[in-house]
Amino acid sequence: MNKKIVAFGEVVWDILPNGKVLGGTPSNLVFRCNSFDEQGILLLRVGDDDLGSEAIEKLKELSISDDNVQVDTEFPTGTVQIILEKNSEPRYIVTPEVAFDHIEFSAEALKLVRDADCLFYGLLPQRFGISKNTLRELIKESPDSLHFFDLKLFEHFFNVSVVENLLWSSNIVRIKEKEIGFLSKELKLNDENLNTFSNELSRKYKIDLILVTRGQNGVFAFHKKKGAFSEPGYNIDEVDNIGSGMAFSAGFLHYYLNGKSIQQALSFGNAAGALNTTKRGATSYFDKKDVLNFMKNTSQNQVQ
């Protein structure tokens, strides 16, 4: 039976040096969840403008339902300037005061999250009051859903109290290894190594499972009772990293929600994220069979 994953937050136009591409963490996650035959559902808001109309049309092209996309008559559709650094890591500059900052609470949204196997959310839509309050209520009203917090940092926005409230509310948290130094200072945690940091984070905020994506070095996980798990990276030719974190998260959830072990879910998610980096952008299609073939035919690096 397909698992229902509701992704709350932003849909944006990524403005790249060579044009614009529809992006946003929730839409990238839903696209990948759907490619693994789960039921990904977006809960977000666009502006009543040309970019909003184009976004809805693009979602339809990607076979993503727009049934729960709100339209804002006052604030514009979100945009993000993406600068690709020399090491291929994207840098994101997000436009403030846009439609996804104003996602409204509704009876339809409430029913969605109460019926969901997983409620997924990130930090970006927590910049302003309306979306922040909506998410807080949806988390509160969905105690039986798995709460997955994608703690990706963005320039110009980090509020310790907002982050801590989300950490307290989450069952699973995904973090980038390169951002642990900043997070450890802000949250007053020891970042001596991944195991120590993850253990302290889990204990302090009562989080069941910490997931750490490590780029070319693979992935790491820490469970509050079962301890540490890891998977090395793959020997691949990278094209770009856009969407690789969400490919990992979608792959992990595909296995985890269907009863596989943490190690199995970590392994499949790791491969999905790596396969994504061999393709252009976040929405180049591949399915479960492609990931399994990649795992079978691609060598992994030495354990770090």
Image (cartoon, helix red, strand yellow):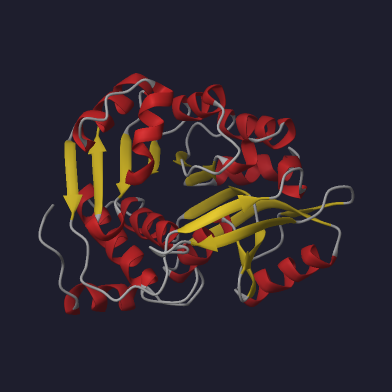
In the rendered view, does 292 fall on the left or right side of 53? left
Residue most extreme to the front:
86
Residue 205 place in picture, x, y as percent: 38, 23
> Is residue 244 visible in this depiction of the protein?
yes
Position of 92 relative to 204 (above/below): below
Q: Horizontally, is 145 left or right of 198 in the view?
A: right
Residue appearing at x 68%, y 51% in the figure: 44
- For the residue pair 124 and 39, the one nearer the viewer reads as 124
Residue 114 percent across, percent down from the top left? 57, 40
At horizontal 52% and vertical 66% (from top left) the residue drawn is 31
Locate residue 284 relative to residue 288 in the image: left or right: right
Q: Residue at x 37, y 70 (%)?
A: 277
Residue extending furthest toward the left: 302
Quarter of the image where one finds residue 296: bottom left
Q: Residue 168 location in percent, x, y?
A: 45, 24
Determine if residue 176 is in view: no
Question: x, y percentage for residue 149?
Answer: 47, 40
Residue 134 falls in image quadrant:
top right
Q: How many marks?
A: 0
Question: Which quarter of the image is occupied by the N terminus?
Answer: bottom left
- The answer to whether residue 243 is left or right of residue 140 is left
Front one among 157 and 199: 157
17 vs 223: above or below: below
Q: Nearer the viewer, residue 117 or 285?
A: 285
Q: Residue furthest right?
A: 73
Q: Residue at x 38, y 25 (%)?
A: 185
| Residue 236 to residue 130: above or below | below
